[in-house]
Image: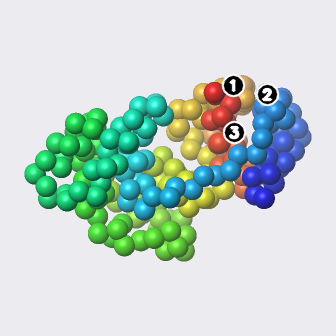
Amino acid sequence: MESKKALKSLIEIAKNKKFEALNEHLLNTQPIKINLSSLNFVHYLVSVVISQQLSTKSARTIWLRVMPLLDKPLASKNFKESLREAGLSGPKTQYVVGLLSNKELALVDRKKLLDMSVEDFQTLLLANKGIGPWSVQMARMFFLGDPDILPLNDLGIKHAHQNLFRGHPMNKNFYEQFSPWRTYLSLIMWRSLS
């Protein structure tokens, strides 16, 4: 099982590199699976946009209000108003409408996305307003199941880095030593904050 293999490898790295705080945390944790979204791709991207810069609890509350609206006609006079009433800001409302209107995104499924190069996947997503590098990383992690993504700009990852890697730089080069298991490290780092 990939999650067990990842945990075993991360424990070995932490021990060999003398990352004591990480090693202690890893020895007291269970393997964490990457939970892939069951949503269609566009709806998944909408959920990512909703979660940007919000606490998990707030994002979930708003998502539960927005989700029933996603199958309603976009041309509906009240659609944008309904999104706003569900808790979306003006810009996020525009981003959601843009995603839902994107015919190219609507045609791709998980298999087509998995067959794309990393660059093509990124280009496809970044062409949409409201989708930035963090959103691309979340899609690679939780829609495609890429085991080797670490979102350096994520606030939770930044906090966890301070706790687990005090005195070490927080940059791409530092985290390369955890490849090919950086998604699993991310999940463990987020869990360390609870």
Horizontal and vertical percent position of residue 81 = 16, 42
Query: How many numbered marks does the figure carry?
Result: 3
> Considering the numbered disc 1 on the image, is that residue within a helix, a strand or a loop?
helix
Quick one: label 3, few (<14), some, or many (20+) residues within 10 Å? many
- Work out whether mark 3 precedes mark 1 in sequence or the reverse, and give the earlier one: 1
Viewer-side residue, 176 vs 25: 25
Image quarter where the N terminus lies is bottom right
| Position of residue 136 in the picture relative to residue 34 (left or right) | left
| Position of residue 93 in the picture relative to residue 12 (left or right) | left
Against 5, residue 167 (above or below) is above
Q: Residue at the location (28% across, 35% down)?
A: 87
Horizontal and vertical percent position of residue 101 = 25, 62
> Considering the numbered disc 3 on the image, is that residue within a helix, a strand or a loop?
helix
The image quarter containing residue 83 is: top left
CB atoms of marks 3 and 1 within 8 Å: no
Identified by mark 2, the residue type is Ala
Against 113, residue 162 (above or below) is above
Label 3, label 1: how far apart the Cα atoms are: 12 Å
Quickly name the residue at label 3: 188
Instruction: Indicate which label's residue lies in the foreground, 3 or 1.
Output: 3
Quickly name the residue at label 2: 21
CB atoms of marks 1 and 2 within 8 Å: yes
Q: Please give the label number shown on residue 163.
A: 1
Image quarter where the C terminus lies is top right
Label 2, label 3: how far apart the Cα atoms are: 12 Å
Q: Is residue 179 visible?
A: no
